[in-house]
Image (spheres, rainbow, N blue to C red):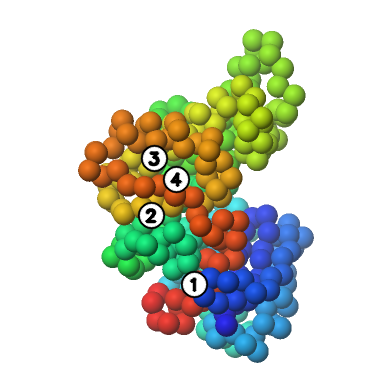
Amino acid sequence: MFIGVDIGGTKIAVSKGEHGEVLEKKVFLTETSPSWEDAVEKIIDAASPFCMEAKAIGISAGGPLNSRRGLILSPPNLPSWDNVPIVKILTERLNRPSFLLNDADAGALAEYRYGKGKEYENIVFCTFGTGMGAGLIINGKLWRGRNDGAGEIGHVRLTEHGPSGYGKIGSVEGWASGSGISHLTDIIASSYLQKGIEIPWFKRGQTTAKTVIENAYKEDVAALEIIKECAKHLGSSLSIIMDMINPDAIILGSLFVRAEKLLRPEMEKVIEKETLKRNICPVFPAQNGENIGDIAALSIAEEGYNGNL
């Protein structure tokens, strides 16, 4: 049995389980904690009842972080979590070995062990949620790079102009992520309003990717245009991965799980056009679906305990 801690900007989930199965979970909103210290105390309180059975603890958080030193280094979605020694704290307080990875690497492990990736030796998992990052499994092993920086596809600039993501205008994250879709919505919806076309579901600076996807499924013209633009740049991003990494498969999380039907046609058109034919590989939605954050954190604990990190 293992404990998984999935630390996100919106919520923190503490689960127990093993072999890709979540048996019990406790969740609290990140914003309910006035400081990281308070949030960590809540994590410890939630995890303590699980410790009787648990062999190890896995922690998944957004980067940047230092997995080898066990530090969270002020991720964009956790700005006050600067140099937080999360591994040291949980190891000492809960008396169990603890291990830390960024959420993209953790997602790659989860899909490789317990999802679609188990059919392959070389996969790239892309978070495609609020942000965009990638985890790499190369020859059956997680590839983290020199400083946990491998797979930062979201930072790659696709265009000189466009929505901003990862602190860079026209980046992959700016075009193809939840936050990117929100920025893209402001741009495209504004052009509709200038033509005198009302968009009832649009609120500048407040419209989420979820709202856009819901309206695209209703065949709203503006929402479909936004999704098409996202899908085109998603295709460009995946073509870079295919030609640079040459994986057996690419697995996409979050938004692709919810909106594959909307995104796939335009995405595949661009991949066919931009990628070397021999390098084109299948693209799948994450098999672990909405549970991938919990399974990812549990996978960290299991892999760490077994000496694979």
Mark 2 highlights which residue?
A: 124
Label located before the other in sequence (1 or 3): 3
Q: Is residue 302 left or right of residue 241?
A: right
Q: Quadrant of the C terminus?
A: bottom left
Label located before the other in sequence (2 or 1): 2
Label 2 sits on what residue type? Val
The answer for how far apart the CA atoms under marks 4 and 1 are is 23 Å
Q: Is residue 91 visible?
A: no
Q: Is residue 201 left or right of residue 17?
A: right
Label 4 sits on what residue type? Gly
Residue appearing at x 53%, y 71% in the figure:
20
Residue appearing at x 41%, y 60% in the figure:
117
Mark 4 highlights which residue?
A: 154
Q: Secondary structure at mark 1?
A: helix
Residue appearing at x 44%, y 68% in the figure:
113
Q: Nearer the viewer, residue 168 or 283?
A: 283
Residue 190 on image: x %, y %? 63, 20
Does the CB distance between marks 3 and 4 fall below 8 Å? no
Label located before the other in sequence (3 or 4): 4
Q: From what the image shows, is residue 179 above or below residue 95?
A: above
Which mark, by number, is residue 237? 3
Mark 1 highlights which residue?
A: 300
Label 1 sits on what residue type? Ile
Q: Secondary structure at mark 2?
A: strand
The answer for how far apart the CA atoms under marks 2 and 1 are is 17 Å
Q: From what the image shows, is residue 22 above or below residue 292?
A: below
Depth-wise, is mark 4 or mark 2 nearer the camera? 2
